[in-house]
């Protein structure tokens, strides 16, 4: 675990494995978007995960009014690869981390050896394109729930566990795992209600400028691309993954049956095997 200065901020970064192995950059909201055991399962790869600014233990300012945009987060990732002297890296993004991964491949193609897009979509927060499925009705009900006390660990863990019951799909929910993960995110952020909300929900994405669009540029991606998507994802429903796989030239779609958003424990064997094969 280390803090690395890039693009005017400090990012909290953790690495796994031998720096001589092929590098894999994992992008989520916090480094815990990619669970410890899944990272460890990527043996034979030099795995790098990090906290975005305004999340985890990276530079924190104000996620409700960020003085940066989505392209700044992409520059953060690009400069992190340079700072670690990784050259061309395999890049995997989960959820909103997939936005960063797509734009890194588009805007810094010389730094990306392959692309893996998990539980994400080809458009930014806000109104979705007419041909893409939006959040499900169950998901919209979650948005309307009373917020927890973001400064109280038990309140936050209960809230995130309730969200995961809906978000995880019929096969993905494991209460013990969810509670442990939510507690770990809480313990690492540990500053203010804003820091907790951003670390758990990636709430800075709703407030930052994500323009211009990039969906129309997906045909420019030339690296091998793997799209991984649960067929019961209520946040970014499966059609979003289908669209990504169709619009990125040569992309492969791996559908996870009975899975919602993210990479719960039951998916780790399949996801690790797919990532190892894709980054070989």
Image (spheres, grey):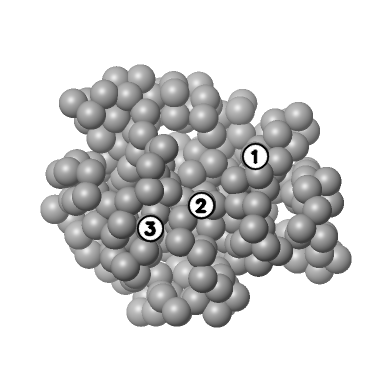
Snapshot quadrant of residue 53: bottom left
The residue that mark 3 highlights is 10
Q: Secondary structure at mark 1?
A: helix
Q: Is residue 136 above or below residue 245?
A: below
Give how far apart the Cα atoms at labels 1 and 3 are.
Answer: 21 Å
Instruction: Tell me the residue at 22%/50% (across/down).
Output: 83
Instruction: Tell me the residue at 24%/57% (across/down).
Output: 79
The residue that mark 2 highlights is 57
The answer to whether any part of residue 31 appears in the image is yes
The residue that mark 1 highlights is 184
Position of the C terminus by quadrant: top left
Instruction: Tell me the residue at 51%/71% (across/down).
Output: 61
Give the side of residue 108 with respect to residue 64, left or right: left
Q: Earlier in the sequence, mark 2 or mark 3?
A: 3
Residue 40 is situated, as x and y percent measured from the top left of the image, at 44, 23
Q: Is residue 140 above or below residue 41?
A: below
Which tag is nearer the camera, tag 1 or tag 3? 3
Give the side of residue 234 with respect to residue 117, left or right: right
Give how far apart the Cα atoms at labels 1 and 2 are.
Answer: 12 Å
Tag count in the figure? 3
Residue 104 is situated, as x and y percent measured from the top left of the image, at 28, 58
Q: Secondary structure at mark 3?
A: strand
Give the side of residue 127 with respect to residue 166, left or right: left
Residue 29 is situated, as x and y percent measured from the top left of the image, at 51, 54
Position of the N terminus by quadrant: top left
């Amino acid at each position: 675990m280390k803090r690395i200065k890039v693009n005017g901020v400090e990012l909290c970064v953790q690495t796994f494995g031998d720096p001589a192995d092929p590098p894999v950059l994992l992008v989520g909201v916090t480094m815990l978007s990619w669970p410890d055991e899944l990272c460890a399962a990527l043996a034979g790869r030099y795995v790098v995960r990090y906290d975005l600014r305004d999340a985890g233990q990276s530079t924190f300012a104000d996620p409700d009014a960020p003085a940066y945009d989505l392209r700044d987060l992409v520059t953060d990732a690009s400069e992190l690869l340079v700072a670690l002297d990784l050259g061309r890296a395999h890049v995997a993004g989960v959820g909103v981390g997939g936005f960063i991964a797509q734009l890194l491949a588009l805007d810094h193609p010389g730094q990306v050896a392959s692309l893996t897009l998990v539980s994400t979509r080809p458009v930014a927060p806000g109104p979705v394109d007419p041909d893409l499925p939006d959040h499900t009705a169950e998901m919209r009900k979650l948005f309307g729930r009373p917020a927890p006390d973001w400064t109280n660990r038990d309140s936050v863990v209960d809230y995130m566990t309730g969200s995961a019951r809906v978000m995880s799909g019929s096969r993905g929910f494991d209460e013990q795992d969810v509670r442990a993960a939510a507690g770990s995110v809480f313990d690492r952020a540990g500053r203010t209600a804003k820091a907790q909300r951003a670390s758990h929900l990636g709430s800075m994405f709703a407030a930052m400028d994500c323009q211009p669009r990039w969906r129309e540029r997906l045909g420019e991606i030339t690296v091998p691309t793997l799209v991984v998507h649960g067929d019961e994802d209520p946040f970014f429903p499966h059609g979003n993954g289908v669209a990504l796989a169709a619009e990125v030239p040569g992309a492969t779609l791996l559908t996870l049956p009975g899975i919602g958003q993210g990479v719960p424990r039951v998916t780790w064997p399949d996801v690790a095997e797919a990532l190892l094969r894709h980054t070989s």
